[in-house]
Image (spheres, rainbow, N blue to C red):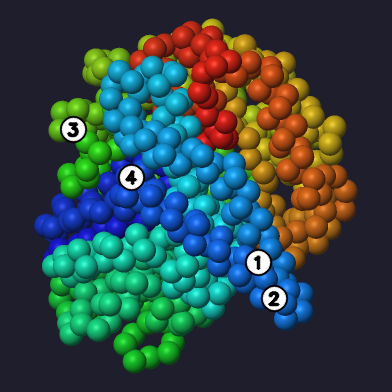
Amino acid sequence: MKVLLLFPPQWTAAQPYFALATLNAQLRREGHEVEIRDLNLELVEHALSAPALKLAERRLSSEIRFAAAEAGLRLATLDHGEKLARAGTRLSHLESYRERRGGDFEAIVRAAGAVPGTLRDPWRYYEPKAHAAAMVAMDAALELYSASYFPSAVRWNDFAHPAVPFNLAPLAAFCADRQANPFVRFFEARLEELLGSDGGLFAISINSFSQVVPGLTLAMMLRKELSKRQGRPHLSLGGNFFSRLREALSEKPLFFSTYADSLVIGEGERPIVKLAQAIGQGGGERLKEVPNLLYLPEGQKKVCCNAEAPNFRMGEMAFQELAGFPLERYLAPDRVVCLRASKGCYWGQCSFCDSYYGLANDSVQVERVVAEMRHLEDAYGVRHFEFVDQCISPQYLALLSDALLEADLSVRWFCNARTEAGFTSELLERIHRAGNTMIMWGVESGSQRLLKLMRKGVSAEGRLEILRRAAQAGIWNFAYVFFGYPSETHEEAQATIDLIRQNVDIIHAYGRSVFTLGKHSPLVKDPQKSGILSIVEDKQELSTNLHYEVAQGIQSRELAEVSRRCNEQCRAAYGDPLWMALRSREALHLYLAHHGRDFVQHYRFNEDSAQAEAEFIF
């Protein structure tokens, strides 16, 4: 059996994606042939190319003429409803963009052409001004590439599509709309090549919210063409996003007739191996043997939901495999490969978190982790690693650090952790000696009341002592914070901002987000305790979050202003530092490993230097 693994836009195109590498390994171990297409990387390369940007410029002019004509027609016919408002807004945005950028189009094209070379080059990537200028050029190119698709916008780390509700009918309409969907033409140009593969199984991995629309656009196009073939290949979807939608999609046969033959729910390593085996043996009734699979049998109208089965234990899995990835084309000079020492969360009590939903708690011996690092270094020259565990305990990090020091591997790595007392000064120094550059801590809030409601299990003051110890050990401290936890007041939000800006010596960087209520978070079971007045069921069929109303505290409409205030005050406190221009945690890690913490901490851009203004990605 040949399997074609497809990774759709839109996410950063700097490193190979972890989920594909693990699926690749399990399939190859069972003797299957695997072809990998990182269409996310291909889209970014395409969007930076001169032909694509010149076409985008011409398309922008034609869309302005079309929007003006539509608005004029609706005015002339006294059609003053919602469609006129949309046409007017669209026309205003497009004309404003052309007025702001019109004289820069040639410069945008030239600068975009230099971006891949800069980010792949080991000297220019690590030169801060060149790196920041490349990211500014990236932003400008992607803005031009997607300008005529307003209000949708393709970004380096995201795809925004505010006008598309996540309901089956409007979502399917958008996926097929060549005028509104910025991915249709891109996929059309590659469809024949993808269909020319002799693979028996096409598998699309959709792992983030930003990939849903482009991923389903690709799936719809493939499904339509494959359905015309006798003995056609099987098209399956999977990935972290859909794990939270099992119940909803089990009642939606239209989803399967539109997008895919099957959907893998939860962790995909065992199901995809079983699915490849079933397809290789003819499919049909054999699909019943594939665990965690939803599918629509041919000619039927009811979705079949196969029983769940335990996934591979972590110690049973093959080391992840990078064979088949276009490693030399990613937009960074060094690979940062993800590792996982554990699944689930050993704390597992935070009221707001459902990121470990569907994961069975598991872990592997540190000797196996070190062996996988050695394999990846020997086979692919990989020396940089990111642990994607929800958080790693101080006890495990002590064992891992000892094992790495004994193995004498020249690797650098970073991870997530909780600010708990087990992180002694001695341990943190040992972690740093073992190659750690950065720990990303769940700081969350500056309010002790909210920390208690969140069930974080740490004190506000105790966290700062852990951060001081880590800073003294030479580790870069990255703090996760968020705003909008139910009942949070403006004073408590300001306390979080003050926590950051008053401790820039030990909080070396931060990433902020806005609270969302996941359908499977513990908070849903007792919402009133946290000040939620009522939960409003999300009417969007493919949403993984819930809308809610709070009795008191910051309202959702006020969060944008809170975030703006955080950006403004914290930027002033840090003084436009280098880390804000690096834009991702992997790039920050590479800079820390290459230049050292002191260089990154103290570097500041001159006023005339190009610096990226976008949010730090975490």
In the image, is 238 to the left or to the right of 353?
A: left
Mark 1 element type? helix
Q: CA distance from mark 3 to mark 2?
A: 60 Å
Q: CA distance from mark 1 to mark 2?
A: 9 Å
Q: Amino acid at mark 1?
A: Ala
Per the rendering, the mark at residue 87 is 1
- Give the residue at mark 3: 380
Q: Amino acid at mark 4?
A: Ala
The image shows a total of numbered marks equal to 4
- Give the residue at mark 4: 50
Q: Quadrant of the N terminus?
A: bottom left
Mark 2 element type? helix
Q: CA distance from mark 4 to mark 2?
A: 36 Å
Q: Earlier in the sequence, mark 1 or mark 4?
A: 4
The image shows residue 339 at horizontal and vertical percentages of: 34, 36
Tell whether label 2 touches label 1 (CB within 8 Å). Answer: yes
Which residue is most to the bottom? 299
Q: CA distance from mark 3 to mark 1?
A: 52 Å
| Residue beneath the point at 54% across and 20% down | 477
Tell whether label 1 touches label 3 (CB within 8 Å). Answer: no
Q: Amino acid at mark 3?
A: Tyr
- Give the residue at mark 2: 74
